[in-house]
Image (cartoon, helix red, strand yellow):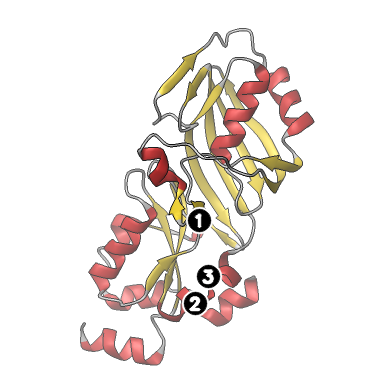
Amino acid sequence: MSSFAQAASAWGLLDGILLVDKPAGPTSHDVVHKIRKRFKIGKVGHGGTLDPNATGLLAILLGKGTKLSDRLLGGDKAYSGIVRLGRVTDTQDCEGKTLAENPWEGVTREQFEAVVADGYVGDIFQTPPMVSAIKSGGVPLYKLARKGQEVERKPRLVHVYRFVVTEWAPPLVSFEVDCTKGTYVRTLAHDVGGVLGCGACLDALRRIRSGPFELKEASCLDEVLQWSEEQLAAKIIPFSRALSLC
């Protein structure tokens, strides 16, 4: 650690939140590891997992911020994404094994929006997918899924404030969703497709807001990894500001 980093750590300048625009490919843990390694910071975490192929806002917690993750980042989320009609997969997204391919040509935008309005806005009970970080017997479900195992999952109450179609280009349907923490957007896509009868999976996902923080405030990961320690310190949101926003 450089003399600046040592002094900054001692003064608490490296304690807080760094907003990163995660690219597709790395896991959220990969991003944490890259930042920890690049800046040699002992305590680094993240506030809200993004799937490897999802992009967008990932809040990185630095120093003492790792102890305040629930308080700082337990708020609502907003996403933009794409649903693919006619394909059902074992992971509920485009990366999974195809379980079925069905005709989608008869589905209209009006039908899609009616299904969403009727059952997927407001309070809903959602069964978490097997490819999730929820634990069963102390083991994350996604690890069991990798072994071909499936266990019973209890439906959980979530709230969807807004679910709107932004572009209709079937079989691809672009959308935006505002929802509570813990909502699985891939499951929304899967469930809506099931009601429509053609099936569907999540083709792309981008997080655009997490609590009070927005994607426009975030820096691209590649850019972050090129920063000096002084540039990093200048971009960190201190606790005083973060807590006042939450």
Vertical position of residue 54 compared to residue 168: above or below: below
Q: Which kind of residue does numbered mark 1 sit on?
A: Lys
Dot 2 or dot 1: first in sequence order is: 2
Contact (Cβ within 8 Å) of mark 3 with mark 2 = yes
Vertical position of residue 178 compared to residue 219: above or below: above
Dot 2 lies on which element?
helix
Q: Which residue is the site of mark 1?
A: 216
Q: Which kind of residue does numbered mark 3 sit on?
A: Ser
Q: Which residue corresponds to the image point at 70% horizontal and 44% vertical from the top-left?
A: 160
Q: Quadrant of the N terminus?
A: bottom left
The part of the image, by quadrant, that contains residue 198 is top right
Where does residue 150 sit, x and y in percent of width and height?
A: 48, 36
Contact (Cβ within 8 Å) of mark 2 with mark 1 = no
Q: Which kind of residue does numbered mark 2 sit on?
A: Lys
Label annotation for residue 69: 3
Dot 3 lies on which element?
helix
The part of the image, by quadrant, that contains residue 209 is bottom right
For mark 1, does the 10 Å Cα neighbourhood hold few (<14), some (14 to 19), or many (20 or more) residues?
A: few
Foreground residue among 52 and 141: 141
